[in-house]
Amino acid sequence: MKKPLIIVMLCFLEHFCIAQNTWNTRDSVARGVSIYVNTGISHYINTLQIDASRVGLKQNFSCSSFRFMWEPEHRLSLGVETGYYKVYEVQLVEGKNINTAALSVIPILFCIQMRIFKRFFASVATGISIHHSEVNYLNNHAESQTMTFSNLQFSTGYIYPITKQFGLGLKAQFLSENKTEDSIFSLQAVVRYQFKRHFKRIRE
């Protein structure tokens, strides 16, 4: 009686081990960290209602941003983003003097990104921004920095994979600065590089 029982148990263990190995191999996934390097043009949405006919208002500038994302096998990814955006520059001529005022921001945001389709993504981010103001008035120069909170950013884009790790794409982005009520729209080219780590999930 014991001998048949031992044989049955050995057969069961062998079948379980084969099934477990097959499951692990089939469900082996890749998770990793991706770096996004973005550059493009930005446009300041004139929320201050500056009269461009009276002063020289510059609203279009080059911009750059960097995004670091942890990307599991799921659709959602988490990470941080920073960058540099010049918001606006105002010039007012008084006689021989050219007075200027400019504002630039460096956002530091917590980002949630979601793959909508195979190569399309959308993201939302919130966090702090460092505002840098620069004023030149009657040959006097002044600079100041302030920190703002509860800023929001929305973006959507497309990534085309060149290799398994390298991809190129394009994204449209809207950044809203809460304290100053300034808004920036940007269109940026995207370069993505993904560092992947392969490991197996264990079935519970």
Image: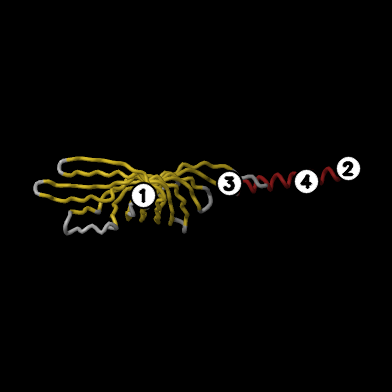
Picture residue at 17% right of the left edge, 59% below the top: 53
Residue at x 43%, y 54% (from the top left corner): 124
Instruction: Tell me which amino acid carries mark 2.
Output: Lys
Q: Which residue is mark 4?
A: 11
Real-space CA distance between mark 3 and mark 2, rounded to the nearest whole angstrom: 39 Å
Which circle's residue, 3 or 2, is located before the other in the chain?
A: 2
Which secondary structure lies at badge 3?
loop
Residue 59 position in % (x across, y down): 24, 54
Instruction: Name the side, left or right, on which 67 lies relative to 74.
Output: left
Mark 1 is on which residue type? Val
**C-beta proximity under 8 Å, tags 1 and 3:** no
Mark 4 neighbour density, 10 Å: few (under 14) some (14–19) many (20 or more): few
Q: Secondary structure at mark 1?
A: strand
Q: As rendered, which of 17 and 126 lies closer to the eye?
A: 126
Counting the numbered discs, the total is: 4
Residue 178 x %, y %: 37, 52
Q: CA distance from mark 1 to mark 2?
A: 67 Å
Kindly state the secondary structure of the residue where label 2 is placed: helix
Q: Look at label 3 and name its amino acid.
A: Ser
The Cα atoms of the two marked residues, 1 and 3, are separated by: 29 Å
> First in sequence: mark 1 or mark 3?
3
> Label 4 amino acid?
Cys
| Residue located beneath label 3 in the image | 28
In the rendered image, is residue 186 in sight?
Answer: no
The residue where tag 1 is placed is 190
Residue at the extreme left: 96
Front disc: 4 or 1: 1
